Amino acid sequence: MIIQGDKMKKTLLAIDDNSIPYRKNVGLYLSKPEVRKEPVLRASEFGSGAVDDGAAHFYGTVLFDEGLYRMWYYACHWGINPDWPSRKMQQFKKLSTRIVGGKQMITGPLCYAESTDGIEWTKPSLGQVLFKGNKENNALLLPHTLVSGATVIKDIGETDTTCRYKMVYQFFPEFSDPIIDEFGNKPTVALATSPDGICWSVADMPFINQFVEHSSFIKHDGKYIIHYHAMGTFAGHFSEGGNPCGRTGIARISSDFKYWPDLMVESFAPTEPEDKNLRGQSGNYDQVHLGVGAASFGNVCVGLYGLWHNADFDNKFGEISCDLGLLVSNDGLHFREPVKGYRFIKRIDSPATSIPGENFNTNLCQANGILNVGDETRIYHGRWRNVDRNEVEEKRKYYSAEVGLAVLARDRWGALRLNPDESHGVVCSAPISMSEDVQKLSVNAEGIDGITVRLLDENFKEIKGFEKGTLIDSGNIEHNVVWGYNKLSQLAKEKIIIQVQIAKTNGISPGLYALYID
């Protein structure tokens, strides 16, 4: 449930067919988010010497925290920082990446930005990292140099205020270097904690020598969950029959953020080619990039996944592009598509800033970027301009990434509406156990004049006194339902089903987006 001050809210979304499974003459109509054309955060100017003069990748997080929008993202920069301590410098020993004008493009560091409106962002000087001669930058001090993926939560339930903010990030240790062999020799993740989201301490590195390119880190139903993707056999993951598989969504879980059992959950898998010889991360078919970029809304999670249109990784990387698909989950581990294969945000709708005369593909990237603020659902996402590392040198400098924003009215991921040529329809929730402190039922809907709400018992029979509720028009997106002098608290400890009847009224077909129980 969503804790809102001293209240708790159960959310039943139209896209969640576990919560609202029953329907007649009604179908799901997914929404189309409004995408802001301009990025909300850009990389610094190419060659400026800034920590993010190569890219501002949103393998990151946006939180709305005490009236302030706060962002954590990972940067790329051109040219090795000569001020790294010797221990950190070791991690560059065998670095191989893009070269332009004799300079390498480097992954990392993690960075911080903030905003009062979530549109215009500043990159504050944190004074933590000495970078190319000065500390006037927004880089975060961490013990690893080559880093990515800054997924952050504010753990409201944490009693230790020094650990109120928790982060999972990826790092890339130097291969086979004895100085840092404690980190292993494969990319993996580190866990970090902070009292303020600015000064971080590494708490653990639970998956040494296991590749984890993650997309989100959430707390759901009291459990901490990391979502990432397994890139075929490289991560020790196989499809049915021990056959190779492409990029697949995977999850890890912990009850206390300290102990992480070395076990995986397949959270979302693509359809693999029937021909087993065509499978694998190099296969020329659609795969799941980064796994699930999830957000918890109490009893339900909504997520995005990268619909990765694959090509030859080594020779045709620039041909790869990526859209974003929509997912929903009730346990935070297993996700499903409300509509299979539907591109919720298309790369053509949210393209990376173009370069005149060039035609580079866009790869959209999801992370901890979904949040509700007021009457809006905001979807922050990455827009990666995919310039092939094998391009001629004068084009390699165009590689970049920025942060984009798409917006919906709050929780309006999709609506249940009448099927074509139908004038009446009905939907019913799954049985719901009512608590003693339940206060109200409300509806997130359009066209409420055509909506009637009834309460049924678990056998689908009407409950006396709750046959027909009155919707109170709030003039907003959420409308309370009342039954005269009858109160929902009268149904404490009972199981009920919410029935919503939908009727076309004055030529208007209503749309039901969500039901809420406070």
Image: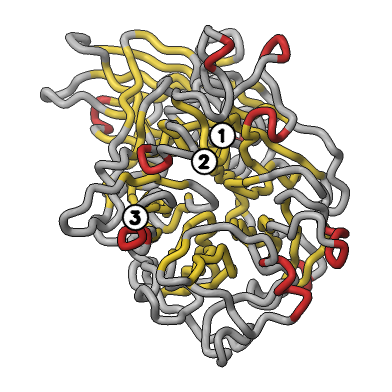
Question: Quick check: can you spot residue 304?
Answer: no
**Secondary structure found at label 1:** helix
User: Is the residue under label 3 in contact with that under label 1 (CB below 8 Å)?
Assistant: no
Place of residue 331 in the rendered image (x, y in percent of width and height, measured from the top left)? 66, 32
Q: Residue at x 61, y 13 (%)?
A: 458
Rounded to the nearest whole Å, what is the CA distance between mark 2 and mark 1?
7 Å
Quickly name the residue at label 3.
392
Q: Are marks 3 and 2 in contact (CB under 8 Å)?
A: no
Say which amino acid is labelled 3.
Val
- The numbered mark, 2 or 1, whose residue comes first in the sequence reads 2
- Asked whether disc 2 touches disc 1, contact meaning CB atoms under 8 Å apart, the reply is yes
The secondary structure type at the circle numbered 3 is loop
Mark 1 Cα shell of 10 Å, populated few (<14), some (14-19), many (≥20): some
Q: Nearer the viewer, residue 162 or 57?
A: 57
- Residue 335 placement, left or right of 53: right
Disc 3 to disc 2, how far (Cα)? 63 Å
Element at label 2: loop
Q: Quadrant of the N terminus?
A: top right
Q: Residue at x 74, y 60 (%)?
A: 174
Q: Quadrant of residue 321?
A: top left
Question: Callout 3: few (<14), some (14-19), or many (20+) C-alpha neighbours within 10 Å?
Answer: few
- The residue to which callout 1 is attached is 488
Q: Which residue is mark 2?
A: 440
Residue 327 visible in the displayed image: yes
Q: Amino acid at mark 2?
A: Lys
